[in-house]
Amino acid sequence: MDKFEEKMGKIAKEDLSEDEINKRFLDEWGDDCICPDCPMYNQCAQEKYEGIYCLLGKSECNLEEDDCICPDCDVFEDLDLKYDLFCIKGSEKELRGA
């Protein structure tokens, strides 16, 4: 079991709502998020205060695929994430099929 699976397992035991889980993610990793520095991050994403796509899911905005910086993010490393392009493809949880 990697760090991501361990973290998700702990959260699942707490029986939190989706909104509570998202708030926890934002509180815990929001300051480490580098999404606003990504070449794909656009004005729409900025206006919607999007970020932490790896945990919260893909963007509601129309983002054009460009160089992905997800692997450079501390959140990516801290949670042993396996995927990238979360803003277009979806969260790590979605991509793992969990």
Image: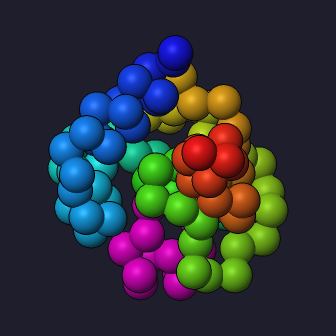
Q: How many labels sit on residues?
A: 0
Residue 6 visible somewhere in the drawing: yes
* Residue in the picture at 51% in, 17% down: 2
Residue at 28% x, 32% y: name it: 10
Of residues 89 and 18, the one drawn nearer to the viewer in this rendering: 18
Q: Please indicate whether residue 90 sits to the left or right of residue 73 in the image.
A: right
Which residue sits at x=78%, y=71%? 64
Q: Position of residue 5 (x, y in %)?
A: 47, 28
Does residue 50 show up magenta in the picture?
yes
Q: Is residue 76 magenta?
A: no
Q: Is residue 92 above or below residue 91?
A: above
Question: Residue at the spot x=22%, y=56% of the render?
Answer: 16
**At which x and y percent is residue 42?**
59, 74
Task: From the viewer's side, name the closer residue of 93 and 58.
Answer: 93
* Residue 40 picture location, percent across and down: 67, 63
Q: Which residues are magenta?
A: 41-51
The quadrant holding residue 58 is: bottom right
Q: Is residue 97 above or below residue 1?
A: below
* Front-most of residues 41 and 25: 25
Using residue 25 as the reference point, say whether residue 92 is left or right of it. Answer: right
Quadrant location of the C terminus in the rendered image: top right
**Residue 38 appearing in the image:** no
In the image, residue 56 sits, relative to residue 30, either above or below, namely below
Judged from this view, the residue extending furthest toward the top is: 1
Q: Position of residue 11 (x, y in %)?
A: 28, 41
Horizontal side, residue 76 vs residue 50: left or right: right
**The quadrant where residue 51 appears:** bottom left
